[in-house]
Image (spheres, rainbow, N blue to C red):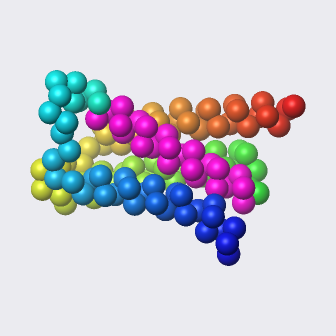
Amino acid sequence: MKKFIKNWFPVIVWMGFIFWLSSIPDLKSGLKEDFILRKIAHVLEYAILTFLLFRAMMIEGINIQKAVIFSIIIAFFYALTDEYHQTFIQGRQGSLKDAGVDSIGVILMSVLCYTKYRKLKGR
């Protein structure tokens, strides 16, 4: 049980952080680059989530292909539910485009994790 909590607690905390950010009614920085900054934040949020998911699954002993596929599915599904959650927050709106931006982070991190792990395993 300790191993499970140690591996999955960071995933749960990060998902909670994303949920909390999505609960903030107006998340604008006030900078003229606000649009770009928010899109970069979307990519980074979901890249980190994907990494944490991949890490937890690899420690649990799931093979690399399944870990990558499950990480992609879970992170993308969470992005969709997060956008849906935003439809209930005044001043926010859910957007499939934002889920698409989230998926860029998911895919980039999945490729990075897969490539890095394969290189390490090849040594």
Q: Is residue 33 above or below residue 57?
A: above
Q: Quadrant of residue 38?
A: top left
Please provide percent x and percent y for residue 20.
Answer: 31, 58
Is residue 21 found left or right of 62 in the rendered image? left
Quadrant where the N terminus is found in the figure: bottom right
- Residue at 55% in and 63% down: 9
Is residue 28 found left or right of 42 in the rendered image? left
Res 100 seen here: no
User: Which is more toward the observer, 57 or 74?
Assistant: 57
User: Which is more toward the observer, 64 or 32?
Assistant: 32
Quadrant where the C terminus is found in the figure: top right
- Extreme residue toward the bottom, this view: 1
Q: Is residue 78 above or below residue 30?
A: below
- Extreme residue toward the top, this view: 32
Please provide percent x and percent y for residue 94.
Answer: 24, 49
Please provide percent x and percent y for residue 57.
Answer: 67, 55
Q: Quadrant of residue 96?
A: top left
Q: Quadrant of residue 51?
A: top right
Q: Find out whether residue 39 is within the magenta segment.
A: yes
Magenta stretch prevailing secondary structure: helix
Please provide percent x and percent y for residue 70.
Answer: 60, 52
- Residue at 40% in and 60% down: 16
- Residue at 59% in and 38% down: 110
Q: Magenta stretch? A: 38-60
